Amino acid sequence: MTGQTLPLFLPKQGLVPDKKFLLDANVLIAAHHDYYAPDLCPGFWECLQHYCNAGRLLSIDRVRDEITGPELLVQWMTQIPASIFVPTDEQRVVDSFGEMMAWVQGNDQFLIEAKEEFARVADGWLAAYASEYDVVVVTNEAFNPNVRRKVPLPNLCLQFGIRCIDTYSMLRELGVRFDWRPSG
């Protein structure tokens, strides 16, 4: 392999052909800050761009609006197709969100502050879009049956029969493999 340049990631045929994945803001923000920082793992960002261009990765307009920093992440978002940030103002998505909002508001498990936050953030809209378009939600949040201070996205997805996975599961389902190469 001496002298060969290896790609930073190797896309393979996905294990779930043509399945689309809907990204939560925390997938991008946490990856950028920590485990897939652009200077450490540019292949992750190339991979996301590849699957955005292929139409396999989506997010919603409200997630785009939530991400206001860091600057390099905002800049990266301008390099991917704007069409991956799908609108949430379609009536069927609005109606689905209304059903989810009613469930949250009627659930005594969650504190008032959690219900108010749910109404403001993108999570419910992600779940509503996923419900209507049969896409897989990708988030770093974890299911927590006893939480009171937040409405976790995985809890909401479970309640409404929406598939919800983490970043690593998404990468595995896409058949992604990151390869190391020496610098310099």
Image (cartoon, rainbow, N blue to C red):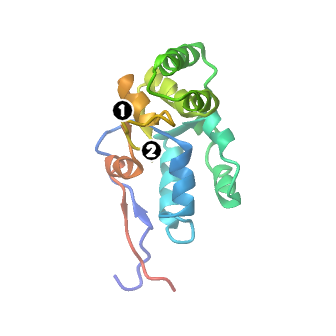
Residue at image point 49% right, 83% down:
183
The picture places residue 123, in percent across and down from the top left corner, at: 54, 33
Q: CA distance from mark 1 to mark 2?
A: 13 Å
* Residue 20 in view of the camera: no
Q: Disc 1 marks which residue?
A: 163
Relative to 50, 113 lies left or right: right
The picture places residue 88, in percent across and down from the top left corner, at: 61, 25
Residue 64 versus residue 158: which sits nearer the camera?
A: 158
Tell me which label, 1 or 2, sits earlier in the chain.
Answer: 2
- Residue type pointed to by label 1: Arg
- Residue type pointed to by label 2: Glu
Could you tell me which secondary element the residue under label 1 belongs to? loop
- Crowding at mark 1 (Cα within 10 Å: few <14, some 14-19, many 20+): some
Q: Disc 2 marks which residue?
A: 141
- Crowding at mark 2 (Cα within 10 Å: few <14, some 14-19, many 20+): some
Could you tell me which secondary element the residue under label 2 belongs to? loop
In the image, residue 155 above or below residue 94 = below
The picture places residue 61, in percent across and down from the top left corner, at: 64, 34
* Residue 118 in view of the camera: yes
Relative to 72, 162 lies left or right: left
Residue at image point 46% right, 24% down:
133
Residue 92 versus residue 106: which sits nearer the camera?
A: 106
Residue at image point 55% right, 38% down:
59
Quadrant assignment for the N terminus: bottom left
Residue 103 versus residue 138: which sits nearer the camera?
A: 103
